[in-house]
Amino acid sequence: MSTILAIESSCDDTGAAVIKDGKILSNVVATQDVHVKYGGVVPELASRAHQQNIVPVVDQALKQANISKSDLSAVAFTRGPGLLGALLVGTSFAKALALGLDIPLIDVNHMQAHILAHFIDEPRPRFPFLCLTVSGGHTQIVKVTAPLEMEVLGETLDDAVGEAFDKSAKLLGLPYPGGPLIDKYAKEGNPLAFEFPEVASQGLNFSFSGIKTAFLNFLRKEQHKDASFIENNLPDICASLQHRLIEILMSKLRRASRETGINEIAIAGGVSANSGLRNRLQELSEKNGWTVHVPAFQYCTDNAAMIAMAAHFKFEAGEFCGQDVSPDPRMKL
Ligand code: KG4
Ligand code: ZN
């Protein structure tokens, strides 16, 4: 029996959640709007906003769960990967609370938590399964053999796919984060209107920097011919770009499934909210005989419920950390 408070502060969302015996009781997130006008996350501003948000967000999570601090069995927090100053806020807060309440601390890997978000609701994936984790900072294919046993089979050698979405959106004059907006415009466009090159990358690894450069050159060339090219063709541009990004992801995922013989497939991370990706995965599941797992929208982008779920598994396994723990911005799986 356990009741755990979990805190997420790795990037620009401050989150807190309560989990009791593996069931999420509350999941509160405060998204920081301060970054929009800068076109990307400003680390120093993210830390300051976490500092302002963390107390009200934790209070709200406890209140919604109808749990008082004295009911808690442990405090969990995101140790990494993420922005150092942002991680420090959640880490310090969790350490102080655990010390004050004299209860154990659980450090959680943010990427592991994205994957374990699949265990919040039924149906849960069966082991072993492959997870394509696609976020603003990461693009990985992970083989998951048990809740806390994961192996990275391939990852991006340069930009993350979320970054490719956001940077391309910026070139189109769309506000940050542009990924969801590309998704929105793509729904009305033709994915085959424009062709972007396939980018070669070794094995199960990804590369997205080439497509970003190709996209920039494409826009420059077309705008030279027609200054209103973007506004006249926005849905087609978004649909074509999104199509190419999804095909890059899917070709590696198909290869991973072939090489491992695993047909249980999951996606996780912010980009897994993308409707084009979800549709394509559904199509492929029928074609390849895959059982596909897609998380609920609120568990795709950064949230503390996934940190709480990971903490639940670590609690069961007796995996705690000491008060000497510090954030790890480059934490590996
Ligand atoms: O997992 P996440 O919330 O934060 C990180 O850990 O990075 O992922 C954020 C990323 C951003 O790049 C955002 O543009 C992207 O997820 N994203 C999307 C969509 N929703 C969020 N990208 C494409 N289509 C979407 N619907
Ligand atoms: Zn994330």
Image (cartoon, helix red, strand yellow):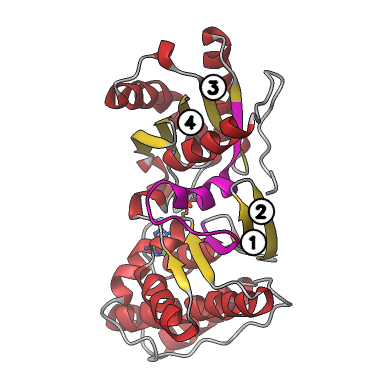
User: Percent x, y for residue 273?
Assistant: 38, 61
Label 4 vs 1, first from the N-terminus: 4
Label 3 vs 2, first from the N-terminus: 3
The one nearer the camera, 213 or 314, is: 314
- Label 3 close to label 4 by CB (< 8 Å): yes
Numbered mark located on residue 7 in the image:
4
Q: Which residue is mark 2?
A: 150
> What residue span does the magenta drawing correspond to?
106-135
How far apart are the alpha carbons under marks 3 and 1?
A: 30 Å
How far apart are the alpha carbons under marks 2 and 1?
A: 6 Å
Residue type, numbered disc 4: Ile
| Ligand 2 lies under 8 Å from the Cβ of mark 3 | no
The structure residue drawn at horizontal position 63% and vertical position 45%, both measured from the top left corner, is 148
Does 26 sit left or right of 106 as displayed? left
Mark 4 against mark 1, which lies toward the viewer?
1
Residue type, numbered disc 2: Met
The one nearer the camera, 225 or 307, is: 307
- Label 3 close to label 1 by CB (< 8 Å): no
Task: Find numbered disc 1 in the image and state the secondary structure of the residue it sits on.
Answer: strand
User: Percent x, y for residue 255?
Assistant: 63, 80
Mark 3 against mark 1, which lies toward the viewer?
1
Label 2 vs 1, first from the N-terminus: 1
Task: Find numbered disc 4 in the image and state the secondary structure of the residue it sits on.
Answer: strand
Mark 3 against mark 2, which lies toward the viewer?
2
Task: Find numbered disc 2 in the image and state the secondary structure of the residue it sits on.
Answer: strand
